[in-house]
Image (cartoon, rainbow, N blue to C red):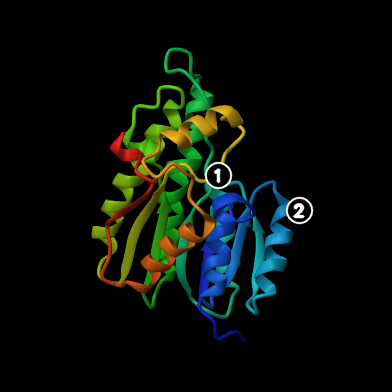
Amino acid sequence: MSTSPLALVTGAARRLGRIFALTLARNGYDLILHYRRSAEQAEQTRAEIEALGVRAILASADLTDPDQIESLFRVVDAQDSPLRILVNSAAVMSAGDLRTLSLQEWDAALNLNLRAPFLMAQQAARRMTQGGLIVNISDVGARKSWTGFPAYAVSKAGVEVLTRLLARTLAPDIRVNAIAPGLILPGAQVPSERWEQLVKRLPLQRAAHPEEIALTLEFLIKNEYITGHVLTLDGGYALL
């Protein structure tokens, strides 16, 4: 029987989700690592976490399907320790134009990026009987008019409102905050030359380091007087 607290991270196989999962492991949490298709990367992340001396359980689920979210929480219920932390990191960032964006594309972004964190938070709150922390992952794009990624921007703006509403609703036992990263890890949507141009425009003129992402999550874990806030980690991008 494990005596370590339990955390669940969505989209934990790679990119930011992997960083969040490793951060929690270094802080002594057993992990449930959610992934959808990245099975090989999820196995690699599990191996890294277990090397730190804590447990890691893999759980595959399509978070756009409410039934699969319920199945994911049956994995939570099967663990010895109660859930203490949920990090909603899974997201999709697809390009589009509001004049031609299809309903399918719109729903795909909103269902994963906004509806899933809402349903995950509902399920988590029922299980955080000893208190807990929910961290939603937003984006600096939530406050920018990114016309090239409309459904993504709308979904992340919704995540920030959802964070504040959850924080008021679930207080005082459960704290709810969000992290809004800026330029951290380049994705397939942005060519490397364009990425370098964007980085050079930043006041700090560099992308964030993984350790800086980790420190932001650690701050929210350790400072128990913070709820309802969105911590922006953008190298000054919001100033532009």
Relative height, residue 234 to residue 172 (above, below): above
Q: Quadrant of residue 1?
A: bottom right
Q: Residue placed at 57% from the left, 72% from the top? A: 25
Asked which secondary structure carries label 1, the reply is loop
| Vertical side of 215 occupied by 28: above or below | below
Horizontal arrangement in the rendering, residue 71 relative to residue 149 (left or right):
right
Write the residue at 37% across / 66% down: 220
Quadrant (top left, top right, bottom left, bottom right) of the C terminus? top left
Estimate the x, y position of residue 26 in percent, counting from the top left.
55, 73
Q: Position of residue 130 (x, y in %)?
A: 38, 78
Which of 203 and 21 lies nearest the eye of the viewer?
Answer: 203
Position of 9 relative to 218 (above/below):
above
Count the numbered circles shown: 2
Q: Which tag, 2 or 1, sits closer to the chain's start? A: 2
Percent coordinates x, y for residue 11 in the rendering: 58, 52
- The local crowd at label 1, few if under 14, some if 14 to 19, many if 20 or more residues have their Cα within 10 Å, is few
Three-letter code, disc 1? Leu
**Foreground of the two, 46 or 66:** 46
Is 205 on the left or on the right of 145, as rendered?
right
Q: Residue at 30% of width from left, 72% of height from top?
A: 224
Measured in 3D between alpha carbons, the distance from the residue under mark 2 to the one under mark 1, in whole angstroms, is 20 Å
Residue labelled with disc 2: 40
Q: Which residue is mark 1?
A: 185
Give me the residue at 34% from left, 58% from top. 177
Say which of 119 and 32 sits in front.
Answer: 32
Nearest-to-viewer mark from 2 and 1? 1
Could you tell me if residue 157 is visible in this image? no
